[in-house]
Image: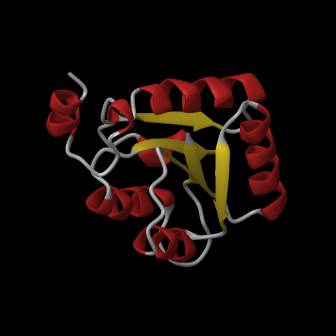
Amino acid sequence: MQVLVVEDEPLIRMSICDLLADAGFACVEAADAREALALLDGGLRPSVLLTDFNLGPGLNGLALAAEALARLPGLAVVHVTANADYLLEHALRPQEQVIAKPFNADMLVRAVARLSDRAWFGVVGQAPAQAAVLAQ
């Protein structure tokens, strides 16, 4: 399974990708929303988007997730944030999860593994109802 990790802090981004690679996930890195969307527009089809909420200038992680979901409706999303209050008014879909910083490695890997298993049965780019039908 491929995970797109979007984090503006290079050391955190690298650490997250190292954890995910050790757990058997392929990891693609992006430093901000603009870079992440360019990867998606270029044909990248990850099973999971893992994004920090605060990505510096430009779109935040919530706005990035909305843009990514417009392109890939079945995409699973892990929101990572030091302040979960930012996401209080956001209704999470079944294929979304919030992880608060600081987090431990096991928590992060379990969240990605759980969502990648549920990334609409690997049918990213399909609407959830379509993916459920295709999986039968």
Q: What sort of colour scheme is used for the picture?
A: secondary structure
From the viewer's perspective, tell me whether residue 29 is left or right of residue 131. right
Q: Is residue 120 above or below residue 47?
A: above
Q: Residue at x 75, y 40 (%)?
A: 21
Say whether residue 102 is left or right of residue 131.
right
Q: Is residue 49 above or below residue 67?
A: above
Quadrant (top left/top right/bottom left/bottom right) for the C terminus = top left
Give whichever of 20, 79 is nearer the camera: 20
Snapshot quadrant of residue 1: top right
**Across the whole image, how many numbered discs are drawn on residues?**
0
Residue 82 seen by the camera: no
Is any part of residue 72 visible from this angle? yes
Location of residue 113 with respect to 85 vertically, above or below: above
Residue at the image point whose x is 34% and y is 64% from the top? 67
Q: Position of residue 65 (x, y in %)?
A: 40, 56
Q: Determine whether, in the image, residue 95 is placed left or right of residue 85.
A: left
Name the image quarter holding residue 101.
top right
Residue 94 x, y percent position in the rendering: 32, 29
Could you tell me residue 45's position as x and y percent?
A: 44, 56
> Quick one: 77 or 125, which is closer to the camera?
125
User: Residue 50 at what x, y percent from top left?
Assistant: 56, 48
Q: Which residue is pictured at 15% across the width and 38% down the height?
A: 130
